[in-house]
Image: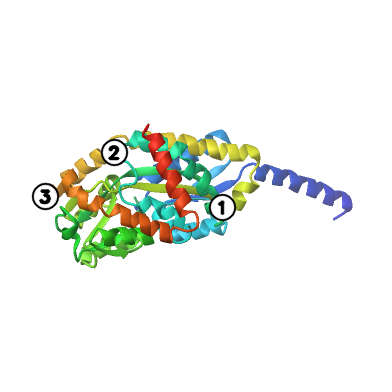
Amino acid sequence: MTYKTLTAASALALMLGATTASADTWRYAFEEAMEEVQGKFAQKFKAEIEANSDHEVQLFPFGTLGESDSILEQTQSGILQFVDQSPGFTGASIPEAQVFFVPYLLPQDTATLATFFKESKAINEMFPPLYAEQGLELLTMFPEGEVMMTTKEPITGPADLDEVKFRVMTNPLLVESYKAFGATPTPLPWGEVYGALQTGIIQGQENPGFYIESTKMYEVTDHITRTGHNNFTTAVMANKDFFDGLSAEDQELVENAIATAFDYIIDYQDGLTEASLAKVKEAKPEITITTLTEEQRAPFKETAASVEATYLEIGGDQAEAILTQLKEDLAAAQGM
Ligand code: 6CS
């Protein structure tokens, strides 16, 4: 090849390179199925990115790339560009993220939660540097609904949880919380839960109403109890080097798509819990769905102080600052 043809070839390669660089394929994995809440969020994100750029977003729902821990690792190593992983699994690497498992800390009201997640200084200013230390750009956190217990026997108070092997996500503070509730907490990855309930290795688990319905938890448990102790929080992140390497225009594109998907997912969940519980009741009329009274909730609520104290011990260097700020942010969102 002569110098002249080489130069022409290089110029062509550069041009092609430039074209490729402006039309990338981004991989995004999440912990749920395509038609569940995280999947709906991801689909909206993809639609926004693809409508406003030449980039393509490939979606990887639960079961395509491995469990939650695995998709986070794949994002940290740059195999994936985006991931949705809930703090329920992030607790080991970012101990401060365990704050979401102090019982009765988060309110159930969706509008208040939406305001809180959007405006919280703890979430939007204090958590991002902690995620950055793990090679992750924290893009957003959003709520996925009221967490309920599903068990084989009815639950009216902590005594009913005695000797109950209760599956929790792999989060040390969530383990402490269920110990305080009187149960025998059993941390397991999601993929093992249905089988473990079916074979009786565990006798209970907790999740939001939509997930109890979509994953058919009602087939392997007989009682749903609304203790009001938590609302499910999840987080969407990008690989930090990837995000930092994007042009300012692409960073803005990602941030706008996340903001649009956030508003969409809040609207999408309007009425979802009650509609899901109605479907559960239709599929299994004999299931009981019980909302505990304030009096029945009181002994569960009494555990909050000790679990909070444990959080301050095991929640990392920023635990106290995060908890204090989060409480201020919640009060502000509640208009107090
Ligand atoms: O309990 C879990 O492990 C799962 N729960 C929800 C609502 N989403 C994903 C997570 O893996």
Density class for disc 1 (Cα within 10 Å; few <14, some 14-19, many ≥20) is some
Give the residue type that dot 3 points to: Glu
Q: Nearer the viewer, residue 34 or 276?
A: 276
Describe the element under mark 2 as helix, strand or loop.
helix
Q: Would you identify the image quadrant in which residue 200 lies? A: bottom left
Q: Which mark is residue 272?
A: 2
Instruction: Give SS at disc 3.
Output: loop
Chain-order first, disc 2 or disc 1: 1
Against 96, residue 23 (above or below) is above
Decide if residue 330 is on the left or right side of residue 205. right
Report how far apart the C-alphas of labels 1 and 3 lie in the structure. Answer: 48 Å
Extreme residue in the top direction: 335
Q: CA distance from mark 2 to mark 1?
A: 33 Å
Image coordinates for residue 224, horizontal then vertical, percent: 19, 50
Q: Residue 146, located in which quarter of the rendered image?
A: top left
Image point (58%, 41%), residue name: 55
- Bin the neighbour count of mark 3 within 10 Å (Cα to Cα): few under 14, some 14-19, many 20 and up: few
Question: Of the residues shown, which amino acid type is indicated by label 2?
Answer: Leu
Q: Say if disc 3 is inside 8 Å of ligand 1.
A: no
Residues at marks 2 and 1 touching, judged by CB atoms closer than 8 Å: no
Mark closer to the observer (1, 3): 1
Residue for point 61% across, 39% down: 250
Label 2 – label 3 distance at C-alpha = 21 Å
Q: Where's the N terminus, which quadrant?
A: bottom right
Q: Is residue 117 visible from the viewing direction of this image?
A: yes
Question: How far across and down, in percent of the image, does residue 110 sit?
Answer: 33, 36
Q: Is residue 286 left or right of residue 336?
A: left
In the picture of the structure, the residue carrying the numbered disc 3 is: 286
**In this orientation, does residue 54 appear?**
no
Amino acid residing under circle 1? Ala
